[in-house]
Amino acid sequence: MKTIIFTSLFFLLITSANVFAQKEVNTEMYGNTLNVGLGIGYYGYVGHSMPALHADYEFHVANNFTLAPFISIYSYKNYYYWGDPHYPYRNYSYRETVIPIGVKGFYYFDQILHAAPRWDFYLAASLGVAIRKTTWENGYYGETTVQHGSSGLYLDGHIGAKYHFNEKAGLFLDLSTGISTFGVAVHL
């Protein structure tokens, strides 16, 4: 996952240097866009995919580049087999809720790809923290850490596209290394 993120960021930096060196100027303004979507996330330590909700708001920073504060949320139920001489061995359930928050950087490739006006194509990277809350069922007294060694750092690489119905609304598809989403993009 880290390799994909760093490779994408390297590609983004190289491409942006080439685009800024060109004399042609992109007239499309990105940003001032609220993106809200539903999706699925897959994390290795969970062992299955789960539904997720994601929202971000893009601000124009530079030609073809936006930054967006984001928040996502997903929750899942899992089981852990545990016991000791005082408690019976069995599967104990727990619910973990994870809320990643941070900043997502978008780089749009419409100019390079000569995309039609209704389409936007981008690479993005997210950096933030993942706030976790784990609730165990009554009667469980074992280790309560679900993911050992987790730093709480949230990194995610994205590739995506937006289709605009008009100047105010459209749809987006964001494929990522963590939470992939499909949703509505509203240009404010």
Image (cartoon, grey):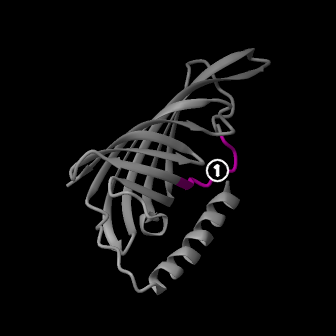
The stretch drawn in magenta includes residue 78:
no
Identify the residue at horizontal 48%, vertical 64% (top origin). 113
Q: How many labels does the image show?
A: 1
The stretch drawn in magenta includes residue 149:
yes
Query: Residue 146, position in %: x, y?
Result: 64, 37
Judge left or right: residue 160 versus residue 82.
Answer: left
Q: Residue 54: tell me if it is visible.
A: yes
| Secondary structure of residue under mark 1 | loop
The correct choice, above or below, for 44 with respect to 160 in the image is above
Q: Which amino acid does label 1 sit on?
A: Ser
Judge left or right: residue 104 versus residue 5.
Answer: left
The correct choice, above or below, for 89 with respect to 50 in the image is above
Identify the residue at horizontal 48%, vertical 78% (top origin). 19
Query: Residue 108, position in %: x, y?
Result: 43, 64
The correct choice, above or below, for 103 with respect to 168 in the image is below
Identify the residue at horizontal 69%, vertical 50% (top origin). 149
Query: Residue 170, position in %: x, y?
Result: 30, 45
* Residue in front for this viewpoint, 187 or 105: 187
Quadrant in the picture for the C terminus:
bottom left
Q: What stretch is highlighted in magenta?
A: 147-158
The correct choice, above or below, for 146 with respect to 178 in the image is above
* Residue in front for this viewpoint, 121 or 50: 121
Identify the residue at horizontal 48%, vertical 51% (top origin). 160
In the displayed orientation, state which residue is furthest to the right: 85
Q: Residue 154: tell me if it is visible.
A: no
Which quarter of the picture shows residue 86?
Answer: top right
Kindly identify which residue carries mark 1: 150
Query: Callout 1 environment at 10 Å: few (<14), some (14 to 19), or many (20+)?
Result: few
